[in-house]
């Protein structure tokens, strides 16, 4: 890949795509062809082909996808499999048809079996059953990997797939209805801090920026006319709303709502014992660019320390898949404490041990990536600090749009009342960040039977 090569990043406004764009720019690449979702819907085959025919990109990073946490995956499984299959089919086929020199497809660690041995190696793909909650999404990602391999085999293309671990960083999704666990924790502690400081205006501004504005507070007047105190009715609505996300108070104040709410606590699902791996998105992007355009010296010296069979299988374009991670994990309890400290939340954290923990450990084996000469540099604490700074700077995120989308598909008020009565084992009227579940899940199958 030359500095003036024409590069298309599909999904450049997302967490991964924006990090890849930043990384390429910082390395001196400048010839980008970019389209927002609105400008080019990758689910429309004719539009995708017309775009490739006109623009003729030489290199493609396929980071566009329908992505979400457990709530979204469980609620919209058909969308997750359909949208992702269609995007991959359209882009990968067009990349072949218009002779793209190299394509890098973003997979995900959820493609590995739920009970895969730890750390998970590339060869564990398709060696056992998948995690049921996101199986449709994982299947669509596996289809993308297999498409790349099949095109390489049949047409001699150079399409490679990477499997990043859990990511965090600028441009993440902080919508508490569908965010991943780490951004959800950042936002929850931020909201809890504001609540304990009685900064109600900032809480409401946060809802406007990052989504989840309660319907009940839309259009109401919140404050007393001549003070910054919330009206009691608005205060109750706000407290009820925050409690749905596990941000709670142990006692309602008697009357005056202005003094700091000192009895705030944050509830987190499970015991905190499961171990997970987290990577700063800019580092993942650096690894993607390295894989797209490996530095020959690093590759040569790295390969010397990697077994010949592993190199053969992972660099062979017919079977190429590469894990991207940091090779270290941390308990959810340690992570939670680290996030609280960085955000400056000093209140209590309560572990709801009645909620499931999920898989005890999820860690990628990154020995191949290390072997070819790439290693991460950013410690988790530093990455989290940068991410929180970016969170605070955000004026308006794309997530408010996502919230709007979810609103559009939301059930009627009557249906919501019905939903409240029928909870699955994972569903609860309160929504909590969990080690592997971002929020509680409503069992809509039960609803369909009502
Ligand atoms: P985001 O939701 O942050 O970004 C997805 C991007 O794709 C957005 O720019 C979105 O635009 C765009 N997009 C979605 N649908 C379409 C469409 N039909 N046409 C055009 N553009 C579309 O996701 P991430 O950046 O987090 O994830 C990107 C990839 O990285 C995914 O394949 C995911 O599996 C993978 N990955 C992510 C991890 C993570 O922790 N986030 C971990 C491992 C892998 P818009 O927002 O406007 O809809």
Image (cartoon, rainbow, N blue to C red):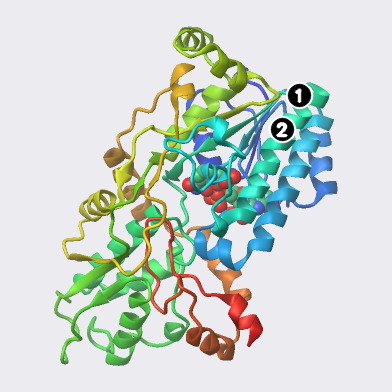
Residue closer to the observer: 165 or 29: 165
Residue drawn 60% across and 54% down?
Answer: 135
Tell me the quarter of the picture where residue 322 sits.
Answer: top right
Q: With respect to residue 131, does 105 lie above or below?
A: above
Residue drawn 22% across and 70% down?
Answer: 265
Residue drawn 41% across and 52% down?
Answer: 359
Q: Are marks 2 and 1 in contact (CB under 8 Å)?
A: yes
Answer left or right for 304 relative to 3: left
* Residue 410 visible in rendering: no
Q: What SS does tag 1 mark?
A: loop
Q: Which mark is residue 310?
A: none
Q: Label 1: which residue?
A: 157
Q: With respect to residue 214, does 139 lie above or below?
A: above
Residue 427, x across and y down, in percent: 46, 74
Residue 220, x across and y down, in percent: 41, 87
Q: With respect to residue 229, does 307 lie above or below?
A: above
* Image quadrant where one finds the N terminus: top right
Residue closer to the observer: 236 or 321: 321
Circle 1 Cα neighbour tier, 10 Å, few/some/many (<14 / 14–19 / ≥20): many
Residue closer to the observer: 140 or 218: 140
Tell me the quarter of the picture where residue 112 sits.
Answer: top right
Q: Label 2: which residue?
A: 148
């Amino acid at each position: 890949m030359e500095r003036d090569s024409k590069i298309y990043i599909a999904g450049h406004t997302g967490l991964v795509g924006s990090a890849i764009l930043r990384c390429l720019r910082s390395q001196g690449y400048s010839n980008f062809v970019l389209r927002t979702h609105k400008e080019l819907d990758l689910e429309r085959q004719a539009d995708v082909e017309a775009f490739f025919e006109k623009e003729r990109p030489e290199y493609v990073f396929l980071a566009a996808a329908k992505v979400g946490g457990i709530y979204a995956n469980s609620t919209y499984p058909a969308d997750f499999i359909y949208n992702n299959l269609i995007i991959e089919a359209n882009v990968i086929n067009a990349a072949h048809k218009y002779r793209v020199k190299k394509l890098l497809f973003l997979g995900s660690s959820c493609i590995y079996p739920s009970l895969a041995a730890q750390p998970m190696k590339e060869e564990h793909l398709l060696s056992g059953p998948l995690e049921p909650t996101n199986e449709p999404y994982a299947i669509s990602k596996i289809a993308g990997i297999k498409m790349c391999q099949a095109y390489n085999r049949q047409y001699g293309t150079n399409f490679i797939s990477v499997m990043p671990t859990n990511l965090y960083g600028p441009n993440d999704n902080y919508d508490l209805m569908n965010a991943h666990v780490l951004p959800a924790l950042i936002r929850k502690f931020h909201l809890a801090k504001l609540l304990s400081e009685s900064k109600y205006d900032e809480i409401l501004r946060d809802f406007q920026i990052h989504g989840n504005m309660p319907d009940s507070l839309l259009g109401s007047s919140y404050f007393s006319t001549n003070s910054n105190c919330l009206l009691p009715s608005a205060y109750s609505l706000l407290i009820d709303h925050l409690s749905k996300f596990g941000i709670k108070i142990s006692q309602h104040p008697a009357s005056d709502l202005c003094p700091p709410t000192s009895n705030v606590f944050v509830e987190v699902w499970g015991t905190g014992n499961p171990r997970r791996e987290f990577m700063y998105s800019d580092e993942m992007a650096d690894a993607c660019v390295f894989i797209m355009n490996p530095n020959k010296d690093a590759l040569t010296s790295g390969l010397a320390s990697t077994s010949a069979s592993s190199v053969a299988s992972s660099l062979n374009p017919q079977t190429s898949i590469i894990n991207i991670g940091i090779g270290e994990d941390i308990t959810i309890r340690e992570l939670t404490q680290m996030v609280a400290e960085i955000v400056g939340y000093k209140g209590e954290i309560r572990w709801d041990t009645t909620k499931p923990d999920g898989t005890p450990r999820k860690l990628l084996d990154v020995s191949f990536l290390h072997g070819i000469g790439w290693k991460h540099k950013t410690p988790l604490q530093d990455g989290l600090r940068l991410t929180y700074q970016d969170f605070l700077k955000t004026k308006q995120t794309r997530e408010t749009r996502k919230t709007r989308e979810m609103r559009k598909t939301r059930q009627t008020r009557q249906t919501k009342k019905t939903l409240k009565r029928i909870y699955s084992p994972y569903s609860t009227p309160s929504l909590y960040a969990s080690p592997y579940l971002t929020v509680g899940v409503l069992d809509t199958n039960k609803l369909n039977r009502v």
